[in-house]
Amino acid sequence: MQTYVGAPQLPSDDKRWKIVEATARRHGREPHALIETLHTVQECFGYLDENALRFVASVLRVPLSRVYGAATFYHFFTLKPKGRHACVVCTGTACYIKGAPLLLKAIEQRYSIKPGETTPDGELSLLTARCLGSCGLAPAAVMDSAVLGKIAPQDILARIERGIHP
Amino acid sequence: MTIEELRKIAETERAAQKKFQHHVCVCIAAGCLSGGAEHVRDALNKEVAESGMRNEVLVKGVGCMGLCSAGPLVTVETAVETAVNTDVQMFASVTPEDAPEIIRSLDTGGATGGDLAAAGLHPCPTNVPFFERQKKIVLENSGKIDPERIEDYIAHDGYVALVTAITEMTPLEVIDRVKSSGLRGRGGAGYPTGLKWSTVAKTGEQQKYVICNADEGDPGAFMDRAVLESDPHRVLEGMAIAAYAVGAQQGFIYVRAEYPLAVKHLKTAIKQAERMGLLGNSISGTRFSFHIDIRLGAGAFVCGEETALIASIEGKRGTPRPRPPFPAESGLWECPTLINNVETFANVAPIVRHGAEWFARIGTEKSKGTKVFALAGRVQNTGLIEVPMGITLREIIYDIGGGVPDGKQYKAVQTGGPSGGCIPAEHLDSPVDYESLARIGSIMGSGGMIVMDETSCMVDVAKYFMEFCMSESCGKCIPCRAGTQQLHGILEKITAGEATPADVALLEELCELVRHTSLCGLGQSAPNPVVTTLKYFREEYDAHVTGDGCPAGTCGCGAGTRACRAETRLGAPGSQTSGEVTL
């Protein structure tokens, strides 16, 4: 069992680790801060790598297995880096009824990636959301934080192309 | 903060707002925001500044106005001195380019709808059933107040209930009032709120917690998000009253990380309330102290279940545990914990303010008050609505929703999300209350309401929800973990046209098993969409099985020719056609 006194060893000089450490400190470095701390890591780095999981485990004094368990249990956390651009297709009920599967199929066929995957060149990640809450705009998708409502398959492909090759 | 001080703030704010002859409200809740509402607000502000009307026109960002499908929405309120009522004009699908025309229309005053339409605007009448058939309690401020200003909330009688409760009422009186109002949990199960409160209160003097469940995981439901984005103080006030009633000192709001705007508004609201002494230590100079912290969810549907939610706040994987003990006796860190849904807390302040009798007059015998629904799918008007309990589904779908568009035939309405059921046309006249919906096999649920027409295949819909439950199952108990996979496998087989009548019989049997043996609500209710579609749309299952094909034509090759089936097997990427079990 690893114990530490005072400030924990940061994995590198990267200033973002200080932000992560600050979150843990704000919660008294108690084990219950695990999810909040993982949120901060993902906010800062975009994803959770092994380094980060080890650091969080040491700073909160919880077993690495518990950190890994939480990181893989919750869909919001990702252990892989995302592509430069992300297209999120909503698969909520309203969007499903109004044609979200067709959007996904079009993107999958054009870029040969499945939901959760990134193109080999690291340009595009295809993601799905349980519900964006924009049910009035169904089917909806988000391309690099721009919400696209009532969108047709050919339009989403055009929009992705414009995003990747402006 | 005393009641007099509160009144003074309200009067100052009202007077400040009255100075403006015209109030231009832009909906900046998530629905309209994604349609570019922020740019509309900026354009309106710029236009007001340029036309030198800064002292006459107040442009403010407000919460959800309800008719999300017509967003971005803007309302223009003009105070007419002679009339009692103010004149309200709503505009739909507003773009930043419309800003000059809207501001110009203020000058002309009595412009008719025709004039406005001629100017390129989309006036949206508010005297239509969509607005008139609603009854707003939870959403009474939504679309009217600026959610980022506590003063605006106070000007609309905000925090009066809290200050009254802690200075003039005993905790027992507060609980009695909630009890006799008949308020029931709005998260879906409908447990009497007052009863829950008194259980927590009876545990004696010790550390207790109040948790607001804002982990709205149902796909197709966005009521809680709208309430948090549009009127966050209402939820804080409800929580604080609850904390006073049960004797808690600390509160948590467990909110989805996918709702950044709701989180932002909540954080702002908590800070403002603390600064005014409406949250924090010795509120209103009494011995009552209450702090609220936010905890972000991380995308696990099961965390809507109370014991899983508690595990998540404790920093663990969100898996449920057997009850009893119920959280009311042993919850967060083994302390008595009150957990209510966002909408439940949002009802508390009006009940304390107007009295239990007022609330109990609304609704049916056993279901009091109103319910907020997210109306979506194949219906003309989609958006957020609040209706009195007891209204019929037909009134909601045809009067408020405007019916099914494109001349299509209504087929079913799905309530309660993955835990609910599909209700056919024959039950459209059934009233919307907890008991009636349960009687026809569905549930009230948290408030998702998705309308489907003839183009939706009910087997496919059942498969969609089962896929959801399968991937959201936490894996703790076997009936849910393995059962949902098996159920999904059979449904896959049916939609691929490869099933036999024996598979349908197996499906029914397995539904019963999963329902009765799962640990928590997720597994217990996961079969509901299958059970109701089997009950009401049996012929669609039969058609897939006997080789007649998918009646709705959505299952692709469904149960078509042999060649078609082969193609389905070979060509469907990623489809799981067998019911493999991973234990």
Image: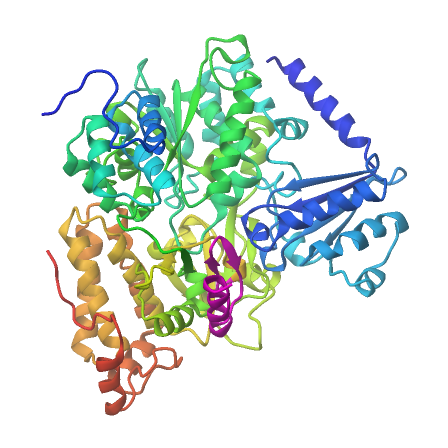
Question: In the image, is B124 to the left or to the right of B522?
Answer: right
Q: Position of residue A46 (x, y in %)?
A: 35, 45
Question: In the image, is B95 to the left or to the right of B520?
Answer: right
Q: Position of residue B59 (x, y in %)?
A: 73, 40
Q: Residue at x 40, y 25 (%)?
A: B251
**Would residue B455 be seen by someone viewing this image from the given angle?**
yes
B4 w.r.t. B311: above or below? above
Q: Is residue A139 highlighted in magenta? A: yes
Furthest-front residue in this view: A13
**Would residue B329 be seen by someone viewing this image from the given angle?**
no
Q: Position of residue B161 (x, y in %)?
A: 57, 23
In the image shown, does B56 or B206 lie closer to the viewer?
B56
In the image shown, does B482 or B544 lie closer to the viewer?
B482
Q: How is the image coloured?
A: rainbow
Q: Is residue B516 highlighted in magenta? A: no
In the image shown, does B452 or B77 lie closer to the viewer?
B77
Question: Which quadrant is the N terminus of chain B positioned in?
Answer: top right
In the image shown, does B119 or B8 lie closer to the viewer?
B119
| Magenta-highlighted residues | A138-166
Question: Which quadrant is the C terminus of chain B positioned in?
Answer: bottom left
Q: Position of residue A99 (x, y in %)?
A: 44, 70
So how many labels did they put on this image? 0
Q: Residue at x 50, y 28 (%)?
A: B236
B109 w.r.t. B571: above or below? above
Question: In the image, is B44 to the left or to the right of B569?
Answer: right
A166 w.r.t. A20: above or below? below
Q: In the figure, residue B331 lies in which quadrant?
A: top left
